[in-house]
Amino acid sequence: MNYTGVRDIEVMVIGAGQAGLAAAFHLRRVGYRPDRDFVVLDHSPRPGGAWQFRWPTLTYDKVHGMHALPGMELTGTDPRRPSSEVIGGYFASYERAFELRVHRPVSVTAVREGVGGRLLVETSHGDYAPRAVVNATGTWDRPFWPRFPGQEAFRGRQLHSAQYEGPEAFRGARVVVVGGGTSAVQQLMEIAPVAAGTTWVTRRPPVFRAGPFGETEGRAAVALVEERVRQGLPPRSVVSVTGLPMTEAVRRARESGVLTRLPLFSRVTPTGVAWADGRTVDAEVILYATGFRAAIDHLAPLKLREPGGGIRMEGTRALRDPRIHLVGYGPSASTVGANRAGRAAVRDIRRLLAGEPSAPAAGDPGLPDSGLVSASVVSGGPA
Ligand SMILES: Cc1cc2nc3c(=O)[nH]c(=O)nc-3n(C[C@H](O)[C@H](O)[C@H](O)COP(=O)(O)OP(=O)(O)OC[C@H]3O[C@@H](n4cnc5c(N)ncnc54)[C@H](O)[C@@H]3O)c2cc1C
């Protein structure tokens, strides 16, 4: 603590989802001590990052490719259990095993320039002055709501997929689902059997992926997002550019007509939605499965954004301020990407704090992937 009541530390990790925990793991691994050299803050009530909020019907067998955190496998899971419980329990065990000492619920309200080359991190529980920040705040806190004329006058219910809690609430209703991603497809398939009718509306025709999704396809998806970030544009999520997986359930839903898609409507009416050509659909509920944006408003005082609205980066480092690393942002917004980015950020921050030149953006084998301990966890409820 310095004389102003602000606590000096080396590194602040904001967010304890996949990305923040991976970064914290690597910080420990290279010798930083939790609560002394680095501090991890998270404003959610429990371990699990955004997974703790995912709807109960999103069982573990429905998530498509969850990568384990570095150093501890996720084993013995029951595929029928909600992923929120499976992953919440796994993250809780992980935090304990590696003594990461996540402080929660603590909200970071602003990161700004501090004194003596340090940053100032303002939180709901006091201020910190780190020399570097790993920002791992994900997207869950910023659901994206598209705007349509007439929305305010709609007499039914409008909700975002982040508020979805399972199909029961839609029983007997006519439902319009907006959005072309995995959440839209999964929620539509759950709602259709109990609803009075469903209509699926997407901006672009959805692309279903017939073949397997291997490393080559993954790399191509990441490259697309990387290109946007390089241009200083707001990133699309990696998951949004991977295409929709063609499962057996999806095949059946397509055959039954549930996944017959209409183009985006032009306005919302008091009783439904309407297209420019005069066509209308009546509905009691509009569900916006329209994705999320990066939850980075607290970084605004640092003015990292480019005119295009995104933050340009070199690896995980913000070009405008090398003390700020974004993990789980843009190209690393997947569980495997978050792991890699956590490791790369720590490698770079170590060099920065030692006064060495920055690392190349990719391909540095400096830190191995394996962990301090190799524990496995049998899934239990969140601790
Ligand atoms: C419905 C859905 C399904 C998905 N399925 C998959 C999948 O199957 N496979 C896959 O690889 N990826 C999937 N993804 C993407 C996946 O969520 C991410 O890859 C990854 O889990 C995100 O990890 P994260 O650590 O970046 O963010 P999060 O898990 O969102 O963690 C961010 C943490 O930061 C905290 N936080 C945010 N703001 C602040 C603040 N101001 N102060 C303090 N704390 C803060 C939050 O409380 C949260 O705990 C899915 C995404 C969605 C929305």
Image (cartoon, helix red, strand yellow):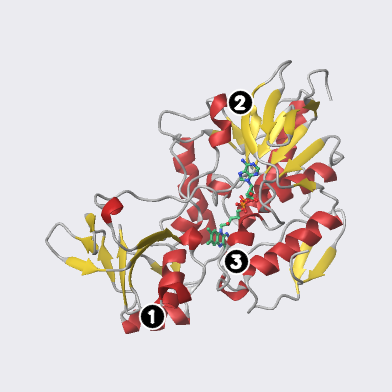
Task: Return the disc, 1 or 2, that comes first in the chain's sequence.
Answer: 1
Q: Which residue is mark 1?
A: 253
* Residue occupying the point 83% across, 18% down: 3
As drawn, the label of residue 244 is: none
Query: Identity of the amino acid at label 3?
Result: Gly
Name the mark nearer the viewer: 3 or 1. 1
Is the CB atom of the residue marked by disc 3 within 8 angstroms of ligand 1's nearest atom? yes
Amino acid type of the residue that numbered disc 2 sits on in the rendered structure: Asp
Q: Which residue is mark 3?
A: 65
Cα separation between marks 3 and 1? 22 Å
Q: Secondary structure at mark 3?
A: loop
Specify the quadrant that holds the N terminus: top right
**Numbered tag placed on residue 321 in the rendering:** 2
- N-term mark: 3 or 1: 3
318 w.r.t. 172: above or below: above
| Secondary structure state at the residue bearing disc 1 | helix
Q: Establish if 315 lies above or below 173.
A: above
